[in-house]
Image (cartoon, rainbow, N blue to C red):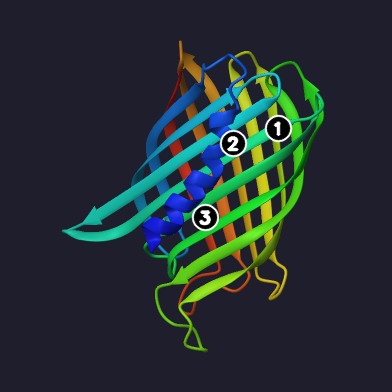
Amino acid sequence: MRMAVSAGLLVAALSPLAAAQDGDNDWEGEGELGVLVTSGNSDETNINARLGLVHEVVSWRNLAEFRTFYSETEDTTTAEEYEAALETNYKFTQNQYWFLRGAYEDDRFSGYDYRSSATTGYGHRVWSSGERSFLDLSVGAGYRYNRLQQPDDDGSRTEDQAIGRLAGQFDYGLSDNALFRQKLSTEVGLSENETITESSTSLQATVVGNLSMKVAYAVTHLSDPPAGSASTDTETSLSLLYGF
């Protein structure tokens, strides 16, 4: 079931990606490897890895992000998480776009077997300066499907409902070699008002060539977490980033 949900989200997001070929097949990306310190449902220091991809042409912008971290102590797994997010934007004007997004998260210590969502809506690049500084805001709606590790009070192991999504990303080039980035998103359940809020703040600076150093702080807050799970998880990371 887990793989079926994941595959469904990936197919839904990749279908428009395949159509978004305006003649330029080049992708830009970055690979990241570093140390991650977590608190909340797991208090550990781990090695984390991330791959981010961007493809942009005149009418389309496509984004993909894959992330994982794992920790083991004395043959016992103490932290394990896998995340994937795919998004395609159709730019119907220079600064306005329609988006379709699919996300999947498998965190062994969150109280969920997995969390998944699919959303679509309207986005607007409300400000930009050069190629590295911009502010994107988006609003949309979709569907959330989660599977609990243990049944809830009603004996159900699944959570599914329509959701509304608000999101923003602010990138600011501090210099030719330094970039500040802030991401914020909120997904609100339309029937049960369950809210998932995620914030990510990072600062990266070029070390040499395509190699950069990055420090980041992320917070995830669930308004109604599974029984026995913390409502807030935090992550602090220091990593090396290679752009290509």
Marks 3 and 1 sit apart, C-alpha to C-alpha, by 33 Å
Q: Is residue 116 above or below residue 204?
A: below
Q: Amino acid at mark 2?
A: Pro
Residues tagged 3 and 1 counted as in contact (Cβ below 8 A): no
Q: Quadrant of residue 225?
A: bottom right
Q: Is residue 212 above or below residue 138?
A: above
Distance (Cα) linking label 1 and label 2: 9 Å
Circle nearer the N terminus (3, 2): 2
Q: Which residue is mark 2?
A: 16
Q: Nearer the viewer, mark 3 or mark 1?
A: 1
Q: Amino acid at mark 1?
A: Tyr
Counting from the top left corner in percent of width and height, residue 84 is at 47, 46
> Distance of mark 3 from mark 2, alpha carbons?
33 Å
Question: Whole-percent x and y of residue 221?
Answer: 60, 62
Residue situated in front as seen by the camera: 199 or 5? 5
Q: Which mark is residue 234?
A: 3
Name which quarter of the figure residue 148 lies in: bottom left
Q: Nearer the viewer, residue 155 or 244?
A: 155
Which residue is outermost to the left? Answer: 75
Mark 2 Cα-neighbour bin, 10 Å: few <14, some 14–19, many ≥20: some
User: Mark 3 or 1 closer to N-term?
Assistant: 1
Q: Quadrant of the N terminus?
A: bottom left
Q: Is residue 152 left or right of residue 42?
A: right
The residue singled out by tag 1 in the image is 90
